[in-house]
Amino acid sequence: MSAARPVGLFAVGDIYFDRKDMAAPYRDLLPLMRKADIRFCNLEAPVVGPRPPLPGRPYPLRSPPGNLDLLAQGNFDVIAIAHNHLMDFGVPGMRETLEHLRSEEHTSELRCSRVS
């Protein structure tokens, strides 16, 4: 029996791709990220095209679908979308987010779990 080895986890919180200048968002972190066994991020904004937010959402966030290629630069193993902005654009916005994540090359498998 061989000895267990430590597992390296790299976690990034609140990723939000809405800026026009998108030059290498992880440039300084990539060397550390590549050493990790598991890379985790929280995608803070729903991925939706132009649409109005739900009424009463004071600070709706949106990541344009065209910016999702930046997520691939991080080579994330786990992408969390359970956050306070997921429903800024209602159920249609949540579904659109899931569709975009499923269709991207970097998301080879998207599993959605329900906690009761």
Image (cartoon, rainbow, N blue to C red):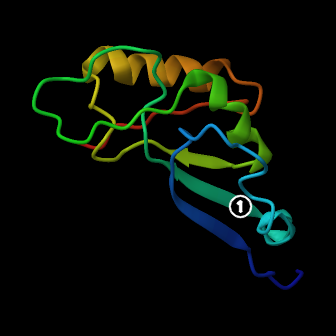
Q: Is residue 78 above or below residue 102?
A: below
93, 80: nearer the viewer:
93
**The C terminus lies in quadrant:** top left
| Residue drawn where x is 59% and y is 31% of the image | 110
* Figure quadrant of residue 58: top left
Residue reaching furthest left?
Answer: 56
Q: Position of residue 45 (x, y in %)?
A: 43, 39
Height in image: 112 above or below 43? above
Q: Amino acid at mark 1?
A: Ile
Please state which of residues 114 and 17 is positioned toward the viewer in this rendering. 17
Res 28 quadrant in image: bottom right
Q: Is residue 35 above or below residue 43?
A: below
Position of residue 75 in the picture relative to residue 56 (left or right): right
Instruction: Please say if 112 is above or below 3.
Output: above
- Picture residue at 79% right of the left edge, 81% below the top: 4
Name the residue at the front extreme. Answer: 21
* Residue 83 in picture, x, y percent from top left: 33, 47
Residue at x 88%, y 80% (from the top left corner): 1
The answer to whether 49 appears left or right of 2 in the picture is: left
Count of numbered circles in the view: 1
Give the SS element for disc 1: strand
Q: What is the crowding at mark 1: few (fewer than 14 residues within 10 Å), some, or many (at least 20)? A: some
Which residue is label 1 attached to?
38
Q: Nearer the viewer, residue 104 or 5?
A: 104
Q: Pinpoint residue 10: horizontal percent, then vertical percent.
A: 67, 68
